[in-house]
Image (spheres, rainbow, N blue to C red):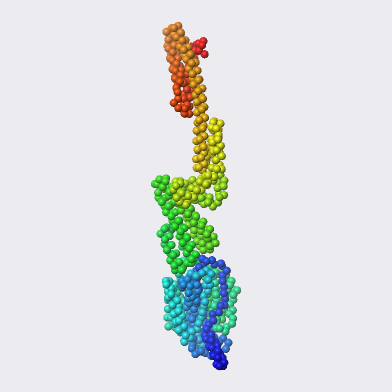
Amino acid sequence: MRKIISALIILLVSQQATFAQRNIETRLGYSYNDEYQFSDEWQYLSTDIYLFNGNKFTRVLNELETGSRKPKKKYGNVLEYLMITAQLKNMKVFGNDEIVYPLYNFAIDQDKNDYKTQVSDHQEVVRIIDKMPLGSATNNIDAAINAKAITNGQSDQVFNLVANQLMAISKLTTPTGAVLSLVGEFGNLLNSRASRKEYKFSSTIRLYEGQDFDTRLHSVRIYVFVPSDVKKVDIKTVKLTDYLQKNPNKLDRRQLEEMTGYKDYPFMVVANYKSLYKMDVLTGDEVTLDLIEKRKLKIQTAYDQQLINDETFRQEKLFVEFLRSFADMKQNLNTYRLNYRNNSADINAKNLFGIVQEYKRLRGIFDAREKEFARNSTYQNIFRSEYESILTNADLYLEADHNLKNGKLLVNTLRELENDPKSWNTPEKREAALARLYAIELPKKEVLSASVEGEAIVRLTQKLEEQQYSEVFQKDVQRLGATEANDETMAQRNTLLEKASASKCQTCREKVREAITDYNKRYDSFKLRQALKKKEELNQSAEATVFKFLKRQLCIANNLQLASASTNDSLDQYISRMHEKNNELGKSIKMLDSLNKRELTEERLDKVQEYNARLQHQIQEVEKDFEVIYTLDKSLCNCEDAS
């Protein structure tokens, strides 16, 4: 029994050795990973395949049959095809299933006792995938290369491979163009086998056409196709590594072959490139609500088809929100421009506030993104510059006229006040801030308070003014309130009024105005008392003036009477004219007496001052009328008791 078991074991081992000789080993001869730190947004893979020393496959095939060191017995079945495949992992477009790509299939001919295959020594580079989404930025992206010599008794293996792959593809609910092109490649493989023609993969699976992606080399693997008993593969790694480090964007076939320096067996270079996600770049003029909706639909479709990863999708949706706020600002701008000259001040103020409101939202959204995604490479490397570009466009739009410029200045002031308490910690800084906050005409406070942005304007303005009043005006206002109103303190009142007039603080000006009004009332009371006192003095003076000049008028009248009795006819005209002057003096005295006896209906400052002025004027009129007579003829005023 033991002899039988031993014989079976020997038979199984020999059978395994026999079949092992039919397999071509794909030996990893060189591995290179670029030192560049690829972040998550480098989410697309492109893979190039270079086949070198194709004419050496004849050597590999024959050594499979005869061995590389000593002749061995030939197999009963003859070799018919040489097939090279690549197995790719983590491809989202294929549901992350492991998919086998048929790369090459070469017919094998037999010449006497040797095999040979017509493989060109200068196969062009084959790009098997182009910018395909990766399942994860950290996943291994290597293609597993496999070469197999197939005998005429193993043709079913090819059909099994094709069948298994088509079944895997059939499980996809929504096959893409990339999937269908791979189905076509399997069809081409079967057709080439039927006609014993060379097959080479030709349908590069490409999802993005015309996109100028940033692409750079991620890794390189060199696989050498050898019989199993070959122990060593000697590739010049130093020169090759230096070449790869200096050419991270594109490799050259001739240079690769030269730097590798390997001539013994066929080998394949697998070059993997990663591409950076490239978003659709927009200028401010292109942004419309219609375009935003199309962009939103496009990114949703791309995400549903697994062309973009979760983080990119999230960033795109957030950017769409930002664009919508920008579009709203543009819409308000258009309304403002069209109607500025025709609308009322209130409507223009509302239109202008709409612009200010959306501009502040834009700035606020950007601030939030900066804070939330400070360490997010997708945002920092791809989206941030586009946010900045849109903001630059918004800034340029707000340079169109002085109102828009001041609106932008208002927003920047609000942001500064909200984010930096030191920006308003002195009276000078608060005055500057208030000047910018009041630089444009805004809607009424109740309208502003209905929105977040308007409420911020009202709240911060009120806070600034309360602090400015407290620090700059309150003591002066209180001091003026406690000060007696008179001519000596009027300078204090005027100084405070000038100080308030120079301030942009509306609350300060209002409270100073109230204090000034109160002072003015007290000052008017002071002036009324003065006026009434003066009235009393003028009344006494007028009474004395009436008596004084009545006596003089009577004296002049008596002197004229005496003069007219003793003069001749030639002096009558002179005496007559002097009588007229004396009568005028009498009328002035009578008017003064009448005015002095008049009672005021109300003791108002203006009324008392007006009365005093008239009374003083009339006293002066009496004195002037007497002075005229005295100047003309002093002798007429010469009376013993008239002084």
Q: Position of residue 281 (x, y in %)?
A: 47, 61
> Residue shown at 51%/43% (left/top)?
505
* Rendered view: 456 above or below 633: below
Is residue 349 visible in the rendered structure shown here? yes
Q: Is residue 147 left or right of residue 187?
A: right
| Viewer-nearest residue: 226 or 45 | 45
Q: Position of residue 22 (x, y in %)?
A: 52, 85
Res. 12 image quadrant = bottom right
| Viewer-nearest residue: 308 or 450 | 450
> Residue shown at 47%/67% (left/top)?
308
* Rendered view: 164 above or below 287: below
* Rendered view: 403 above or below 548: below
Which residue is farthest left?
342
Q: Is residue 393 left or right of residue 483?
A: left
Q: Position of residue 63 (x, y in %)?
A: 54, 86
Quadrant in the picture for the N terminus: bottom right
> Residue shown at 54%/44% (left/top)?
468
Which residue is farthest right?
238
**How many numbered markers are drawn?**
0
Q: Position of residue 202 (x, y in %)?
A: 45, 75
| Viewer-nearest residue: 505 or 153 | 505
* Rendered view: 116 above or below 421: below
Is residue 588 visible in the rendered structure shown here? no
| Viewer-nearest residue: 605 or 624 | 605
